[in-house]
Image (cartoon, helix red, strand yellow):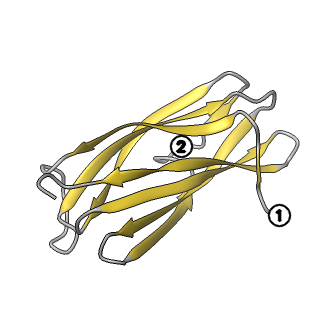
Amino acid sequence: MKPILLSGFEATVDHVVYSPDLPASPDQPHPFVYYITIRNGSDRTVTVKGRKWVVRGEDGKTLAMEGDGVVGCFPRLEPGEHFSYNSYHTTAGRAVAEGAYLGITEEGEAVMARIPPFALIPPGE
């Protein structure tokens, strides 16, 4: 079942911070913490079941990641509720991240909220 965009079910990127003290691999040495809020402005209850991220590096490499839930949770959002969290990505250099949260309504309809693109730019680049 292909998810549909549900009007009012949305994600915002609240803040992005370069965090060089976080663990990172030698091939992806630049860690960025991002703060996101998922809002349910619809008239339906939605449970967030998963997410998909795509990170496109300036070097032409694309990394796609999918997973269940959000930071180990499956937030159930009644109309008007929101869920905020933070996590991080590492990059080789400049990159753009975007994606979607996948949810299901109480009626069993698959829905999604897009994560708008945001830049990951290491200092000095």
Location of mark 2 (residue): 73
Give the left or right position of residue 9, taking residue 72 as reference.
Answer: right
Q: Amino acid at mark 1?
A: Met
Q: Percent from the top left, x then y, of residue 28?
A: 22, 69
Q: Residues within 10 Å of mark 1 (few under 14, many from 20)?
A: few
Foreground residue, 98 or 105? 98
| Above or below, comparing residue 95 to residue 111 in the picture | below
Quadrant that contains the N terminus: bottom right
Q: Residue at x 54, y 31 (%)?
A: 83
| Above or below, comparing residue 50 to residue 77 in the picture | below
Q: Quadrant of residue 82?
A: top right
Q: Residue furthest bottom?
A: 60
Q: Percent from the top left, x then y, of residue 72?
A: 49, 48
Give the left or right position of residue 108, taking residue 83 as reference.
Answer: right
Q: Residue furthest right?
A: 107
Q: Residue furthest top?
A: 80
Ranked by sequence position, the earlier of labels 2 and 1 is 1
Q: Percent from the top left, x then y, of residue 92?
A: 23, 69
Q: Residue at x 19, y 46 (%)?
A: 19
Element marked by disc 2: loop
Foreground residue, 44 or 54? 54
Quadrant that contains the C terminus: bottom left
- Give yes or no for contact between labels 2 and 1 (Cβ–Cβ under 8 Å): no
Element marked by disc 1: loop
Foreground residue, 60 or 10? 60
Q: Amino acid at mark 2?
A: Cys
Foreground residue, 65 or 14? 14
